[in-house]
Amino acid sequence: MRIPIWLTLIAALVVVIVVIIIGLAVVAPNQPLIPAAQFSTDTITPNADGSDDIAIFSYTLTKNARVSLTLEGADGQVFAFRQDEPRIPGDYRVQFSGVVDGFALDGEDFGDQQILQRLMPDGAYTWRLIATTEAGETAEQSGTLNIVDGDAPLPLLTDFTVFPQIFTPNQDGIADRSQINVFLTKEATLTAYLIDANGEPLYMSERFEDARPGEAGRHLFDYEGGVDLGANPPPDGTYPLIVHAQDAVGQRVQRESELTIQTGGKPLAQIIPQPVGVSVVWEVVPWAEAYASTRDQIGQLAPLPSDLQAVDMTRLDVMQGDVLVFKLTVEN
């Protein structure tokens, strides 16, 4: 009796599937989610001296998962270096210097200063790498790490002022500049910038006065919107103002304020010559009490020169007590 060909094909397909399953089990056996994880050393000294400032943390992941790396001190405080971040299967290496997301210790109050990143205190820590798949599978690896001789003081930004907070960068001599003053408590890289409507930074230049760039001490940023350099200032509006400090070990602190730009623009005014061929016409008129201005009242304007042809541009005598007036035409 002949076996139908379709039964033969089905049997062959089943055999192929079984062979593939067995082959996969042999070539790629069911591996743990985190086969390995470790620091390259058990002690770091993060003080920017170039020796043992960092450790390399390496681990292997066999499935898509979200990964967290935390360090817990002897007092139970937990610091997060990575928090619930997605990763695909593979080998990973990352440098760790003891700097984690910003935190405040008991009793600390930094006011409106934002501690973006901060060095963990010296001590012995238990690190934990936890990975969780979408299916709910979880794996953990742990170990110990010691931090000693860390350069822990923060580069704090104190005595932060902005004046004026509303300025008009147009070179009319009135509120053309704004000055940002800040005191830096520790050597650090200091930057000041506005955030434009597209989220891009508009950096300001530091003015060299009490402290050189990077030194601890008082720093001044003098901002005129770029008009003095022939550039167009940012469009009128209110902008977030950021002052940011980062020290040698990677600790980052910033403070925020606002700066408002009004009637900004490059001056395009020019003096147009008078019909008689001169740019400025001068004339002397007798003094009158009506011209006097007080705090409460503005005096009258003196009469402008009327006889332009009679003006002697080579010599002009002004008697004591008289008023010198001039006339010119400005085009803008």
Image: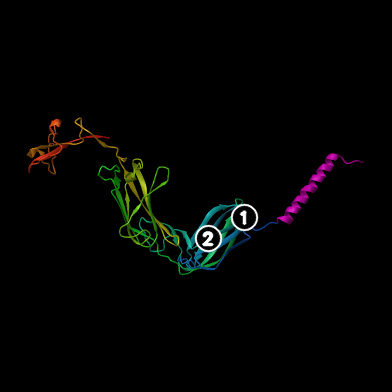
- The answer to whether residue 26 is magenta is yes
**Residue 114 in sight:** no
Most extreme residue toward the right, as rendered?
1
Say which residue appears at 62% left-offset and 55% top-offset.
90
Say which residue appears at 51% left-offset and 61% top-offset.
96
Say which residue appears at 56% left-offset and 55% top-offset.
67
Quadrant location, the C terminus: top left
**Residue 166 in sight:** yes
178 vs 291, left or right, is: right
Place of residue 50 in the rendered image (x, y in percent of width and height, measured from the top left):
48, 66
Q: Earlier in the sequence, mark 2 or mark 1?
A: 1
The magenta segment is 1-28
- The answer to whether residue 101 is magenta is no
Q: Secondary structure at mark 2?
A: strand
Q: Are marks 2 and 1 in contact (CB under 8 Å)?
A: no
Q: Amino acid at mark 1?
A: Gly
* Callout count: 2
Q: Nearer the viewer, residue 268 or 166?
A: 268
Q: Nearer the viewer, residue 199 or 142?
A: 199
Question: Can you identify the residue that label 1 sits on?
Answer: 90
Most extreme residue toward the front, as rendered?
314
Q: Taking 44 as reference, is 12 above or below it?
A: above
Q: Nearer the viewer, residue 143 or 253?
A: 253
Question: Can you identify the residue that label 2 sits on?
Answer: 95
Q: Amino acid at mark 2?
A: Gln
Q: Main secondary structure of the magenta part?
A: helix
Which picture quadrant has residue 238? Answer: top left
